[in-house]
Structures are given as C-alpha cells and as structure tokens.
Image (tube, grey):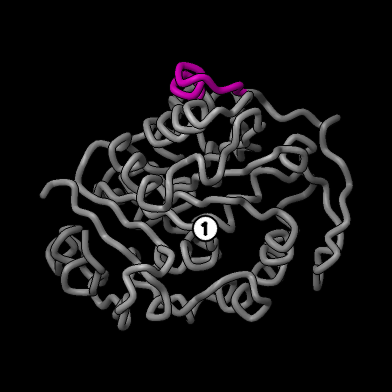
Amino acid sequence: MSFINRRDFIKLTGLSTVAFSGFVNMPQLIGKVTDEAMPLDLAVVQNSDPASLIRKAVEMLGGMSRFVKKGNTVLVKPNIGWDRAPEQAANTNPEVVAEVIRLCRKAGAAKVMVFDNPCNEARRCYRRSQIEEAAKAAGADVSFMYQQKYQKTKIPQAKMLTSWEIYRDALQADVMINVPIAKHHSLSRVTLGMKNLMGVIGGNRGALHNHFDVKIVDLNTLIKPQLTIIDAVRILLRNGPQGGNLNDVKTINTVIAGVDPVATDAFGATLFDLVPEKLGFLREAHARGLGEIDLSRLKIEHVNLAG
C-alpha cells in the first residue's frame, strides 16, 4: 500500500505517449501526507479482476459495514444508460456492480435496489449491459423506472434547478452507493459520479444541459451518496457518452472509491488528463462546499494487487 504520485500512477496504469497520445500530462496527485492515522479520503486499487478491486477499495475505506447497516434499504446506482456491451465501456462494468451488491448483502442490507433511467430503451440497456443478469444473481432487486414513482421535489440549496422530478425510491433509500463508469462526455468533457445522478431524475433531462455546471451541482446538493465507487476497469476515451468503437476504449483495471463525491470525481478526471480545477462542474461543487477539488490536500492510498 502506498501513496500515489504522478510517476507511479502513469507506470502502474500503463499510461504512456504510445498508449495514450495526449493523455500523459497528469498533474501531481498527492501532497505531503505524514499522519498515517488520518482518515483515508480516496482508495485507488489496480491490476486485478473487478470483484477483487472492489473488495480491496471498500476494505481500505473501512469496509461496507461503515456504510450499510443491518436492515438498510440500499440503492446501488450504476450507469445503465446505453444499449452497449460491457467491452464498449458505455455502462458500468457488471462485475463491479455485482460485487458492490454482494458486499451490501453481506453487511446486512435487507434490500438492494438497482435501477437507472437510460437514454436508450430500458430493456435493451439492462440486458445488453449484462447488469440486469449480474445484479439479480448477486441478490439485488433490479427494476425499471416508472413514471408514477417520480415526484416533484424542491431543491432548497439550488441556484437554478429549484425543483425537479426525482425518483421516489432514490429519495427513500437508507443508503445510496453511486457506481459510475469513467468516460468521456461531449458536453462536460468527462462523466463520473456527479453526472451519474441524472439517472435518478425524470422530466426533460436535456434542459439540464443549459447551464449544466450549475444545474448538476444543484442536483448534487440534494442527492448525496454515502459512497462513490468509480469503475475504471475500462474507460471510454472518446466519443462519449455512448461510444461504440472499441478503439476508443482503454483497459486500465482501476477502481476509485471515496466518501467525498467531488474528490472522487476530481481524481477520476485525471485519468483523462483533465485538471479538476478546470472543469466547471467541479469548481462549482467545490465553491459550494460539496467537497474537495485540490487533490494535494487529500490522503490518497494506492494498492497494486499485481504486487
């Protein structure tokens, strides 16, 4: 176990000018950390199968029992937005989703829900992503989202998105675990955890694209996952969010987990050679006190399971 820096991260992920043309100028990720007793902000685990990555990352943060108590109803919220197969990296890896569910059940969750509001037809997305099958096998209640369950909800801390239709089951869950995939996005440049929460809302979601940076943060002032786990087993480098071309996909076998959704997204952005402070939605979220954007201020631990 070690604290990650730019050189080690590039070496361990296999990022290089050959593999990632234009994706190597990653900022320094960690500042001085001297107190081993400090709570861990981010766990970064690499180089194993998806289930092992998840188990180790959650263990590093204190175990799933830190987040899920006996009898809880838990929402595990993956990205199931597109009619794409896992190797195309448009949706969360089904093995990642399944292991999160298994850990929730082991921690004593009475019910684990999995759902999303896809951009493509829901049944095709659930099936082709392989998330429906994997989640059910792991013990989750997988459901489609129905119009009658959306409720107009006030967002008290919003600047612009003062109310919106939000799915009742998401609002009523005892625990939400956000499990996005890391991928390119044509509007926000990258889509990670904060944007993944658009999957629990209804209405005309395209309206959020106008003044996106403010509105997505508005939503995140109300919907606050207890844990964010970014799936970077495969990342979509270009032509997101839907992708489709395997040449746009890079396998880096990485999982990033943290309690702070802004910090988790900030680290995820560096996978795409993006400086967190230059992303509007992250600047806005940090300015409103939703989390830390400066990775040098965080305690980040890295584990390479390959040894």
Whether residue 125 is visible, yes or no, is no
Residue at the image point whose x is 61% and y is 21% from the top: 141
Tell me the amino acid under the disc marked 1: Val
> Which residue was labeled with disc 1?
259
Within-10-Å neighbours for mark 1: few <14, some 14–19, many 20+: many
Q: Quadrant of the N terminus?
A: bottom left
Q: Nearer the viewer, residue 245 or 17?
A: 17
Q: For the point 69% across and 39% down, which residue is it?
A: 174
**Quadrant position of residue 123:** top right
Q: Position of residue 52 (x, y in %)?
A: 28, 37
Name the residue rendered at 82%, 32% in the picture: 149
> Which region is colored magenta?
132-142
Residue 224: image location, x then y, percent: 66, 55
Q: Is residue 139 magenta?
A: yes
Residue 21 as seen in the image, left or right of residue 144: left
Image height check: is 102 above or below 96? above
Residue 72 falls within the magenta-colored stretch: no
User: Which image quadrant is residue 116 in?
Assistant: top right
Query: Is residue 55 rendered to the left or right of residue 215?
Result: left
* Residue 302 horizontal side relative to residue 219, left or right: left
